């Protein structure tokens, strides 16, 4: 970081296996490089997976399924990076994802750069999501969304239940139901004059 502050960074490569539920008390970055079919067992529905990490980066070309957990729960730190980043050809499946936006301005809680993210519920703690090239599928609802930016890929939202700003500059976005939405498209007719 620019301030010279140190932070923890971990990389775990996994192929066709079950990962333990990893948590930290002091934040940091966890990169999971997934090959084949992998699962993470949360240890029970009262426990969240990856709790305490400022950022979870999921890459690779496999599938990671979160089982037996309250939620995938990360973010909220001071690092100016998204709480959850999905990149590559990886697929992440989890019933409930709860992300706390970073404590910095205009940094998304969720960034889908590639791959596929499938969830029933997505909680963004008044944060922003960006889909720049992957597939984001939320079967249930997106809660506490402040802004959604669609730059590429495909986004399927079951419902967005609050006031949110939607910016569509690429890709496709579909929602079953959006309540109180402000939609921007780029370029706008004003930009063409």
Image (tube, helix red, strand yellow):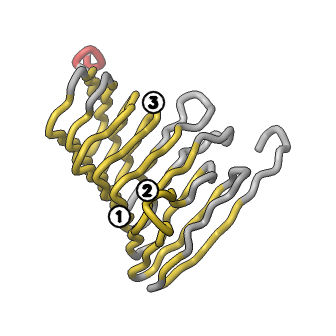
Quarter of the picture containing the C terminus is: top left
Residue 187 in view: no
Residue 54: horizontal and vertical position, in percent?
A: 62, 48
Tell me which numbered mark, 1 or 3, is placed earlier along the sequence.
1
3D distance between C-alphas at marks 1 and 2: 14 Å
Residue in the picture at 39% in, 59% down: 114
Residue drawn at (43%, 55%), measured in percent from left and top?
71
Of the residues under marks 3 and 2, which one precedes in the sequence? 2
State how far apart marks 3 and 2 are (Cα): 20 Å
- Name, please, the residue furthest toward the left: 176
Tell me which residue sits at (49%, 38%) in the image. Answer: 108
Give percent across and percent down for residue 34: 48, 75
The 10 Å Cα crowd at callout 3, few under 14, some 14 to 19, many 20 or more, is some
Q: Is residue 144 above or below residue 17?
A: above
Q: Kindly identify which residue carries mark 1.
A: 93
Spatial CA span between label 1 and label 3: 22 Å
Work out whether residue 109 can be spotted.
yes
Instruction: Mark 3 and mark 2 in contact? Answer it, CB < 8 Å.
Output: no
* Pointer 1 with pointer 2, Cβ within 8 A: no
Q: Earlier in the sequence, mark 1 or mark 2?
A: 2
Q: Secondary structure at mark 1?
A: strand
SS type, badge 3: strand
Give the vertical position of 134 relative to 60 (above or below). Answer: above
Q: Which mark is residue 126?
A: 3
Nearest to the observer: residue 53 or residue 105: 53
Q: Nearer the viewer, residue 190 or 62?
A: 62
Residue drawn at x 83%, y 44% is 5
Mark sitting on residue 70: 2
For this rendering, which residue is in front, 79 or 123? 123
In the image, is 44 to the left or to the right of 187?
right
């Amino acid at each position: 970081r620019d301030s010279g502050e140190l932070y923890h960074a971990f990389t775990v490569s996994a192929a066709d296996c079950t990962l333990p539920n990893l948590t930290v008390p002091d934040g940091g970055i966890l990169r999971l490089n997934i090959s084949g079919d992998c699962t993470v067992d949360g240890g029970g529905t009262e426990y969240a997976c990856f709790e305490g990490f400022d950022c979870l980066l999921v890459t690779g070309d496999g599938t990671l399924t979160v089982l037996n957990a309250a939620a995938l729960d990360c973010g909220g730190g001071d690092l100016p990076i998204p709480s959850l980043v999905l990149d590559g050809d990886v697929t992440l499946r989890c019933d409930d994802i709860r992300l706390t936006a970073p404590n910095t301005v205009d940094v998304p809680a969720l960034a889908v750069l590639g791959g596929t993210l499938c969830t029933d519920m997505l909680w963004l703690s008044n944060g922003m999501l960006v889909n720049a090239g992957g597939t984001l599928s939320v079967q249930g609802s997106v809660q506490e969304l402040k802004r959604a930016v669609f730059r590429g890929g495909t986004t399927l939202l079951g419902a967005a239940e609050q006031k949110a700003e939607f910016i569509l500059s690429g890709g496709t976005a579909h929602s079953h139901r959006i309540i109180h939405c402000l939609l921007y498209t780029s370029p706008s007719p004003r930009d063409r004059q």
